[in-house]
Amino acid sequence: MILTDRYSEALTYAERLHRAQTRKGTDVPYVAHLLAVCATVLEWGGDEDTAIAALLHDAVEDQGGLDTLAVIEDRFGPRVAGIVSACTDSVATDRAEKAPWLERKRAHLAKLSRATSEVALVTAADKLHNAQATIRNIRHRGLGTLSRFNASPEQMLWYFARVCQVLKEHRATAPIEELEQEVATLARLLGRPVPELDVSSEP
């Protein structure tokens, strides 16, 4: 697959959207996360639309809500916009208007239970990089780094594990096994067992 000017346009657009944003509690430019997710998507065989969606997967949630989604659809087409929308757990433009963390994650998991292969790939790549970054921060700076997040360590571990469970049918086309390995590592660092999940389990 050869990437086209559409990808270049998306990369520039994503960087501009997130230019003032950093990874939570750090000075790491947010675009580093977007590039990592996109790289995983491409390495797992994602096509150009899916790679573009990977670059823009947080754009609606963090940078403008439904207005931004409309721009994405206009510039990159309905398929890209559909993937981005499916990867989004809030369209609120004001962070204060977002639903509580657990409520958003419950709703997003329900949506992921119907995920297409493209949505599963972007989502797994996203959670994989988030888990890897969390593990890296714990190893370098200690468990205190987790205080920057809205969720408790138990909730984070539960959510990563539930994503693995919900997307398990996509193991052949998305990095589910890699995410499971990171969940096990995170559980070990937290001194907790990997969650034993069923449909109704919550942290």
Image (cartoon, helix red, strand yellow):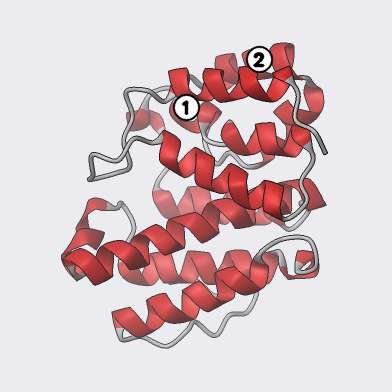
Closer to the chain start, of discs 2 and 1, is 2
Name the one closer to the observer, 18 or 157. Answer: 18
Q: Residue at x 65, y 74 (%)?
A: 177
Residue 111 in sight: no
Q: Is residue 105 visible?
A: yes
* Foreground residue among 63 and 12: 12
Q: Residues within 10 Å of mark 1 (few under 14, many from 20)?
A: some
Question: Label 2: which residue?
Answer: 70
Residue under numbered circle 1: 92
Q: Quadrant of residue 113?
A: bottom right
Residue at the (70%, 47%) spot, across then down: 42
Q: Residue 149: give x, y in percent of width and height.
A: 29, 53
Are dots 2 and 1 in contact, CB under 8 Å?
Answer: no
Q: Amino acid at mark 1?
A: Ala
Give the CA distance from mark 2 to mark 1. 14 Å
Judged left or right of residue 186, residue 140 is: left
